[in-house]
Each structure stands twice: as structure tokens, then as C-alpha cells.
Amino acid sequence: MDIASFLIYCFVVTFTPGPTNIAILSTVHNFGTKKAMEYTYGATIAFGLLLIISAILNMMLITIIPKILIVMQIIGSVYMLYLAYQIYKMDTSEPTVNQTATLMSGFLMQFLNPKVVLFTMAVIPGFILPYYTAMPAVIISVIVITVIGFLAFIIWVLFGTIFKKFLQNHKKAVNVIMALFLVYAAIMIWM
């Protein structure tokens, strides 16, 4: 496995603005750090659960239909390229919606967040299963990805105000760099 591509992909997808990260940022601004952390815990639990579900489903599919891995790699690569395009054209100046910041709202947000659902369904077949199919390796991978997601959420909590201002001041440059990283990760799936 190309560890660099795997980590770049995980960091770019989890650290770039998306519905959960923007909700965390809004929560920090509107309700404070304590409520944002409560929301973050719920989001992290759901993120890990989605990764577990993805790993189980993908491992079952690979066992039943071994050739499905190539199809899943193609879908994962296309999704990464799509995400790169979305990040490239993203407008971070749009206002965020205020919401109640609870553990449950953070948990439920992940299941309604297409970025997270697609990421969890792409990362396992795209980066893990082509190289590791043993349960311990898959479990360790799920834990690593969940920790990366949690770190991303924490960064948005801790540096929310500074990060939001930076993104607004340099949004085009940041979006181009993040999009290029995703294109690189999509290409490296095939190397």
C-alpha cells in the first residue's frame, strides 16, 4: 500500500471543509468549545461506525465477488476526482446554518453527510483491501482512519475562528492545493 497516498487522501478529505467541519466551526462560534466537543464526539463515533460498516460490506463483497475490487477502486478514484473538483470550486463564504450542538446531532450528521458516507465507502476498497484482507489489519486501518477524522474535528474546534478566516482570505489557493492532493491520491490508487 502507498501509505503516503492513503494518508494524504484521509487528511485531505477529513480536514477540508465539509458539512460536519462547517457545523463544528459554526458550533464553536455560536455555542462554544464545550458544545463543539460534545458534537465532535458524536460525529467521531458515527464516523468510526460508518468505517466499520464499510469494511464489513466491502470484505463480504470481495469474498463473494473477487473482481469487484477493481470496480470499487474505479468508483473510489472517480469519487476522489469529483471531490477534488468540488473542493476546487468551493465557496467558503456561504453562511452556515445554526443547529443544536449535541452528541446525537453530531452522530446523526455523519449518516446524512454524503461526503462522509462516500469517503467511508471509498477508502476501504481503494486503499486497504487491495493489500490487506486479514481482520486485524482492517480493524487497525479503521482505527487509524477514525483517529485521523477525530483529529480533523478537533482541529476545527481548536482553531475554528483562525482557520475560517484563513480559508476565507486564501480560499482559492487552499482549495487548489487540496484538490491537487486529491487528484494525486486518486492517481496513486493505480500505481
Image (tube, rainbow, N blue to C red):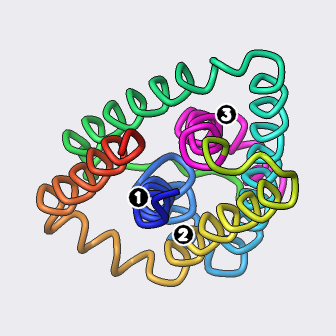
**Can you say which quadrant of the picture contains the C terminus?**
top left
Task: Give the quadrant of residue 74.
Answer: top left
First in sequence: mark 3 vs mark 1: 1
Magenta stretch bounds: 102-128
Residue 144 is at least partly visible in this image:
yes
Q: Can you identify the residue that label 1 sits on?
A: 5
Task: Give the quadrant of residue 53.
Answer: top right
Left or right side of 152 for 150: right
Q: Are marks 3 and 2 in contact (CB under 8 Å)?
A: no
> Which sits in the foreground, 58 or 172?
58
Identify residue type, mark 2.
Ala
At horizontal 41% and vertical 58% (from top left) the residue drawn is 5
Label drawn at residue 112: 3
Label 2's element?
helix
- Give the spatial CA distance, label 2 vs label 1: 17 Å
Q: Can you identify the residue that label 2 sits on?
A: 152
107 up-or-down from 171: above or below: above
Residue 117 lies in the magenta-colored region: yes
At horizontal 57% and vertical 36% (from top left) the residue drawn is 122
> Which sits in the foreground, 129 or 91?
129
Question: Given this view, does label 2 or label 1 mark the residue nearer the observer?
Answer: 1
